[in-house]
Image (cartoon, rainbow, N blue to C red):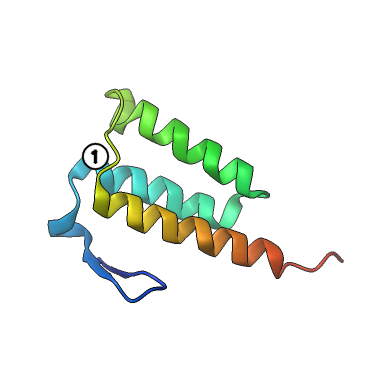
């Protein structure tokens, strides 16, 4: 999968990320839509990096995955700011 961040950087998850990083990214892409607050998203990010893949242990947040997750966080902030209460 090719991911393009809001600032125009492109990443090929097949070659730019490890299997462990791809697993964490998949979890956080779900939380991008589910998080009811930025704090909830940040907590899920922290937990995902601590647990790793199938509870394999902590994953070091490399530069590329950090940029991608930071971009997801910005999208969460944008979504929450533009959500209107019924």
- The x and y percentages for residue 16 are 16, 57
Judging by the rendered image, the residue that carries numbered circle 1 is 20
- The x and y percentages for residue 10 are 25, 71
Q: Is residue 46 left or right of residue 76?
A: left
Q: Is residue 41 above or below residue 12?
A: above
Q: Is residue 77 above or below residue 37?
A: below
Q: What residue do we see at 54% from left, 36% from top?
A: 43
Q: What residue do we see at 43% from left, 55% from top?
A: 70
Name which quarter of the figure residue 76 lies in: bottom right
User: For this rendering, which residue is in front, 21 or 42?
Assistant: 42
Q: Residues within 10 Å of mark 1 (few under 14, many from 20)?
A: some
Q: What residue do we see at 26% from left, 50% from top?
A: 63
Q: What residue do we see at 67% from left, 49% from top?
A: 37
Q: Is residue 85 left or right of residue 17?
A: right
- The x and y percentages for residue 74 are 52, 61
Quadrant that contains the N terminus: bottom left
User: For this rendering, which residue is in front, 54 or 52?
Assistant: 52
Name which quarter of the figure residue 77 lies in: bottom right
């Amino acid at each position: 999968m090719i991911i393009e961040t809001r600032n125009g950087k492109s990443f090929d998850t097949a070659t730019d990320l490890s299997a462990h990083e791809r697993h964490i990214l998949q979890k956080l892409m779900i939380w991008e839509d589910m998080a009811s607050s930025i704090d909830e998203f940040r907590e899920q990010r922290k937990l995902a990096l601590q647990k790793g893949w199938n509870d394999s242990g902590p994953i070091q947040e490399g530069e590329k995955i950090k940029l991608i997750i930071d971009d997801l966080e910005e999208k969460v902030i944008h979504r929450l700011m533009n959500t209107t209460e019924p």
